[in-house]
């Protein structure tokens, strides 16, 4: 099975009553060829983004179903967040980034 370019050249040669080799070297034949867009495979960046979205959604689902509904876990979660924020803002203030 020939590729699209070879098929185009053969059809162009038959339509214009030329040989394959002659049509291959003609500028008109090259200009008449319209390359079909190819399917672009996913890049590493788009795969990473898909993973981030999935992770974000699963974390939110876990939070909504397990932490938010359980008062004991929710209080622990808030304490953990307060501690992390205090540590972060302490580092920011000592580095004079504020």
Image: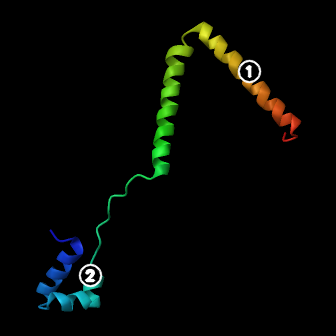
Q: Position of residue 77 (x, y in %)?
A: 64, 17
**Whole-percent x, y for residue 38 in the image:** 32, 62
Image quadrant holding the N terminus, namely: bottom left
The one nearer the camera, 20 or 15, is 20
Displayed quadrant of residue 89: top right
> Of all residues shown, which one is farthest toward the top?
72
- In the image, is residue 19 above or below residue 53? below
Mark 2, secondary structure of its residue: helix
The mark found on residue 32 in the picture is: 2
Q: Residue at x 29, y 89 (%)?
A: 27
Residue at left offset 49%, top offset 44%: 48
Residue that mark 1 sits on: 82
Residue 43, numbered label: none
Residue drawn 86% across and 35% down? 93
Asked if 58 appears above or below 97 in the picture, the reply is above
Q: Is residue 20 above or below residue 3?
A: below
Q: CA distance from mark 1 to mark 2?
A: 67 Å
SS at circle 1: helix
Q: Is residue 23 left or right of residue 87?
A: left
Tell me how many marks there are. Answer: 2
Residue nearest the viewer, comparing 87 with 67: 87
| Lower sequence index among marks 1 and 2 | 2
Left or right of 96 in this view: 61:
left
Residue 8: image location, x then y, percent = 20, 77
């Amino acid at each position: 099975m020939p590729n699209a370019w070879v098929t185009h050249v053969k059809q162009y040669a038959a339509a214009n009553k030329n040989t394959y080799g002659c049509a291959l070297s003609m500028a008109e034949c090259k200009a008449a060829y319209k390359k079909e867009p190819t399917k672009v495979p996913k890049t590493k960046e788009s795969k990473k983004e898909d993973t981030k979205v999935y992770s974000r959604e699963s974390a939110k689902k876990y939070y909504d179903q397990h932490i938010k509904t359980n008062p004991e876990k929710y209080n622990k979660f808030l304490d953990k967040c307060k501690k992390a924020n205090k540590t972060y803002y302490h580092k920011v203030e000592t580095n004079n980034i504020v």
